[in-house]
Image (cartoon, rainbow, N blue to C red):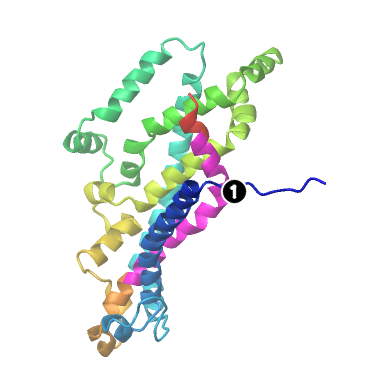
Amino acid sequence: MLTKSKIREPFGDRVLLVTIYVLLGALTLTVLYPLLYILSSSLSSPNAVVSGQVWLYPVEFSLKAYKSIFQSSQLMLGYYNSIVYTVVGTFINVSFTVLMAFPLSQRMMAGRKYIMILMMITMFFSGGLIPTYLLVKNLHLLDTRWALWLPSAFSVFQVIIARTFFMSSIPTELQEAAQMDGCRDTRYLWSIVLPLSKPILAVMTLMYAVGHWNAYFDALIYLRSEHLFPLQYVLRNMLILNAADPEMLANTAQKLRDQGFEQVLKYALIVVACVPVLIMYPFVQKHFVKGVMIGSLKG
């Protein structure tokens, strides 16, 4: 009777595997610990944070910082503005990217190689901040929401990735069959290409959405009205310039403020700003890896 014997890996391979696991574990702890510390500090009392008692878990559990945050009309307005900028901006970005990438993926399009070369040049050379500001100003977009949408309507890099996906993952036979049935390019794009492009659309949506959510520099340059400031710009003022909203401190005792309540408040602000992205990622994660690999390995 034949007996199954387990093939043992060479000693050098096992040592290498253990070394890789140890390094990955250490890297994971390096990334996770600051996040866990911020979360624990935001849920701890000001006295525990200031005295250095918080290391891993919350000490003297408290939700006062979060209650103060959600009582701030300035922060809630920033939240609303960031959601608007992210949703509308991502829709504009994905739409323009698809409308640019799909024609460039058609092999019968005349001059598409030259168009790609011109677009790629913009990845290495740009007009600069001052010419861009003057252009936005001459278009009367200053202090409007469009100043955060139109100048970055699409990314050339994302166009290249989407174009590569359309060319390598969607058979040309589908388009030929659709044309034989009298399907126009617009209907072919909407009914066939987009449903088959969910992985790359998920990648673009996540990339663009995270970019809009974390953006503050464009708001710093182009916006002047406080009612248009996005969340990240408001947080910048609070965390860097220490310009805390008085409404967040209005219901807090002076003793708490003196003992580090504003520091706990900063930790809570960081957590609140990260939550929407953390909620969004699991819904597109299954498409994310597939889309990135297809767009990066083929072409």
Point out the residue furthest to the left here.
130
Q: Examine the residues drawn in magenta and state their main secondary structure.
A: helix
Q: Residue visible at 43% across and 37% down?
A: 93
In terms of image quadrants, where is residue 148? Answer: top left
Horizontal and vertical percent position of residue 273: 39, 62
Q: Residues within 10 Å of mark 1 (few under 14, many from 20)?
A: few
Secondary structure of the residue carrying numbered label 1: loop
Is 192 contained in the magenta span? Answer: no
Task: Describe residue 176's horizontal placement relative to residue 13 as left or right.
Answer: right
242 over 61 or under it: above or below:
above
Any part of residue 17 in sight: yes
47 over 86 or under it: above or below:
below
Q: Which one is in front, 282 or 256? A: 282
263 over 143 or under it: above or below:
below
In terms of image quadrants, where is residue 130? Answer: top left
- Tell me where the magenta segment starts and ends, as one range: 267-293
Residue at the spot of label 1: 8
275 over 263 or under it: above or below:
above
Point out the residue furthest to the right here.
1
Horizontal and vertical percent position of residue 120: 33, 24
Q: Residue visible at 40% across and 55% down?
A: 23
Horizontal and vertical percent position of residue 183: 66, 19
Horizontal and vertical percent position of residue 29: 40, 63
Q: As shown in the figure, which amino acid type bears the numbered disc 1?
A: Arg
Q: Residue visible at 59% across and 48% down?
A: 8
Is 290 contained in the magenta span? Answer: yes
Point out the residue furthest to the front here.
1
Task: Describe residue 39's horizontal placement relative to residue 151 as left or right.
Answer: right
Any part of residue 71 in sight: no
